[in-house]
Amino acid sequence: MRVNRRGFVRLGAAGLVGGVASGRRLVALAQGPADGPSFELVQPELFAISGGQPSCWADFDNDGDLDLFVGFKDAVANRLYRNDRGTFVEIAGDAGLADLTDTRAAAWGDFNADGRLELYVGFTRRSGVANKLYRYDVNGGNGRFTDVAHDLGVDVKGETRQASWVDFDNDGRVDLFIAFRDAPNMLLRNEGNRFVDVAKDMGVDDPRKTVGAVWFDMNDDGRLDLFVANQDGTLNGLFRNEGSRFVDVAHELGMDADGRPATFGSNGPSVADYDNDGRLDLFVAGYGRNFLYHNDGAGRFTDVAAAVGVAGGDKATPSGWGDYDNDGRPDLYVSSYVDRPVNEHDFLFHNDGSKFSDAMIEMIAKHGATHGVQWVDFDGDGALDLSLANNNPNGGHYLFRNTMPATRARRSIQVMVVDEHGHHTHAGSEVRVYAPGTRKVLGGRLVDTGGGYCSQSVMPVHIGLPGDGKVDVEVTAMTKNGRRITRVANVDPNKLPKRVLVVKVSATSQSSQ
């Protein structure tokens, strides 16, 4: 064992050695095979407490660093970790977010388009506590969050499992979708000064024990559609947005998991263009088996999970796509939940092109996740780091820093999609990167709408690249005038601050930057 000049404790694949202090941070290094992943465990004492469930990232204080909120089980206070240039400080108590209620969902979003992010927090029905909507009051730099849920009509109760900020009707205002495990789902339309539940009128009041949801434009018609993952043998739903109403087409498309037993169910859906064909595909983690729906175009999908090697899992719960080795192909983390505190069997599926192989390393497998899985470049070096939350008694909510060489980390670009005023109102937008001057797709991702399980983040979309050099970037956003494409040509990621390109989308006209 040795401590290097950056204060990291270097170890082999055996994992963490506890109790070694090294300046501001205590970390350990896990190294996979020579060509495999390599990660450091960041500030493990800070992130060691068990009970973590939802976890979501956003720059809540607009200082340029991504911060982390984690919700916990009963009797453990929720936490807000402020990122101070790569070092995290826990401030939930001072910020007014340290709820002790069993927290099962959390989502960042800018519902009032004021440039400051709000946080929606969902609880369990048995707690008797209504969900909260926290608005951030800057207050001269000593900001606190204030619960405004009752004033806005979103202080609802239930077994909340997923909250998503999306503009489902393309009116320019961010709406709120809430999935419940024990009641019909809610779709709360933003009326400006209040939210109104329109789920029944719009046809998305699904009563089938929903525990996961993701919004994306499944058929390229300029409207966000909704996939819901349902538990206890109930069918999954894919609600096609037809403007005035949603229609469940999951059975018609063979995507409802018809015929499964009551012990099976789906959990964490997530979206990415895994084969770089320009179309967004859908992965659904679940009890019994997983699904990977390849997007065939024209609103049609084919399940290829078994064929590419991602169908298996032990009670799979969250899932998350991220190109951890910057080879231009998104990889997939799939976690699991086990009723008793035993070792979960998580998977880190490396995208080999035509198939996936398990590239899990011992340190990550040792800690694992049950709920929160987030890929995030928290230090802005171009390499995706991994954030996990585990609610078992021996679990933690650890952050693993990706230690790939700087030359490899440079093979990436991140894209932050905002509206013409610089506000985060375009969740569900699609980001594609092309070889310069061509239509060769190098990668495609979705601006987060809550896919994965129980969390929604506001952070740049990360795309690994097969090589270093300039690229063309294209953002497709859903607006009142349909799909709007914003193109940025000949982008050099090496000249971008923290490799992040900010793309402003006009709601009224097609534009380029």
Image (tube, rainbow, N blue to C red):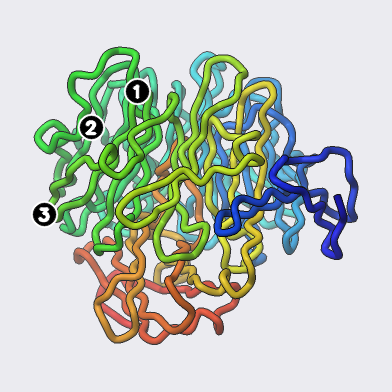
Image coordinates of residue 174 in percent, x first then y, are 38, 52
- Mark identifier at residue 87: none
Q: Quick one: label 1, few (<14), some, or many (20+) residues within 10 Å?
A: some
Residue type at mark 2: give it.
Gly
Q: Nearer the viewer, mark 1 or mark 2?
A: 1
- Mark identifier at residue 298: 3
Q: Is residue 104 left or right of residue 66?
A: left
**Measuring 31% from the left and 23% from the top, which residue is drawn there?**
184
How much space separates mark 1 and mark 2, taking CA atoms? 18 Å
Image coordinates of residue 290 in percent, x first then y, are 33, 33
Residue type at mark 3: give it.
Ala
Residue 461 figure quarter: bottom left
- Mark identifier at residue 237: 2
Identify whether 220 is placed above or below 126: below
N-terminal label among 3 and 2: 2
Identify whether 75 is placed above or below 456: above
Residue type at mark 1: give it.
Gly
Image coordinates of residue 41 in percent, x first then y, are 71, 48
Q: Quick one: label 2, few (<14), some, or many (20+) residues within 10 Å?
A: many
Identify whether 50 is placed above or below 440: above
The residue where tag 1 is placed is 288
Image coordinates of residue 73 in percent, x first then y, are 62, 24
Q: How many labels, in total?
A: 3
How much space separates mark 3 and mark 1, taking CA atoms? 29 Å
In front here: 492 or 346? 346
How much space separates mark 3 and mark 2, taking CA atoms? 18 Å
Q: Quadrant of the C terminus?
A: bottom left
Q: Is residue 376 left or right of residue 170?
A: right
